[in-house]
Image: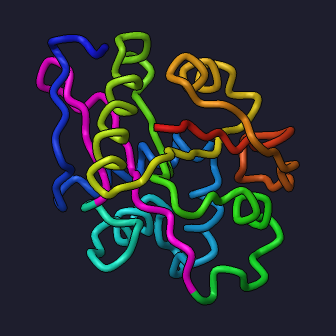
Amino acid sequence: MASADVRYRPARRDETRRIAELYSIASDGVADYVWSRIAQPGEDILDVGARRYAREDTEFSYRNCTVAEYDDRVAGMMVAYRMETFPGRDAEPDPVLKPFAILEHPESYYICGLALYPEFSNRGIGSGFIEIAQQHARATDLRQLSLIVFERNAGAVRLYQRNGFVEIARQPIVPHALIRGTGEALLMVKDL
């Protein structure tokens, strides 16, 4: 259970730069890779992420983000949404992103990214985010949560296991200079 000092709230549009920063942490560089491929010449990749999260008509929107504040400071964020099956989803993805596309788990409430600033770890905030994701999943009649995590991120894997997630699939990570994770990416699912 999260500490009483933590307050969870919907993210605001004026927080998209912070959301991008935290999503970069959560993705272990995968977001940096995506954003670098669509950046304009000279554009900072966090500005690309902020621009993308400022949109309202996509899953990668501030509207799908929850922010945690601890003692009135932003401690972390979670981006989560209903993982749908839709036309075009099966198109051949970028080879670096293909393992993640293979691991997507349709018809679940997908925790796309969950990150805390390091000074706020071990305070129950991550478990609080998972509780919120469960509430959102139930409100949309979904019976599973899903997420993808790098196996080498042992702290995150333990957090998810403590909260009832089980590994159901894995894929090798395609190496790239911007992606900090190595080894395998795990698809973890929790039945509600």
Residue pictured at 35% horizontal, 71% vertical? 51
Q: In what quadrant of the picture does the N terminus appear?
A: top left
**In the depicted view, which residue is nearer to us: 180 or 95?**
95
- Residue 40, given in percent of the width and then of the height, sits at 51, 81
Which image quadrant is residue 30 in?
Answer: bottom right
- Residue 141, given in percent of the width and then of the height, sits at 35, 56
Residue pictured at 64% horizontal, 80% vertical? 89
Q: What secondary structure is the magenta-colored segment mainly?
A: strand
- Residue 70, given in percent of the width and then of the height, sits at 20, 21
- Residue 62 located left or right of residue 126: left
Please, which colouring scheme is shown? rainbow
Residue pictured at 82% horizontal, 40% vertical? 182
**In the depicted view, which residue is nearer to us: 146 or 38?**
146
Residue pictured at 42% horizontal, 16% vertical? 121
**In the depicted view, which residue is nearer to us: 43 or 68?**
68
- Residue 58, given in percent of the width and then of the height, sits at 38, 75
**In the depicted view, which residue is nearer to us: 192 or 187?**
192
Depicted 9 relative to depicted 139: above or below: above
Q: In what quadrant of the picture does the C terminus appear?
A: top left
Does the magenta run of residues contain 65?
yes
**Magenta segment:** 64-86
Does the magenta run of residues contain 25?
no
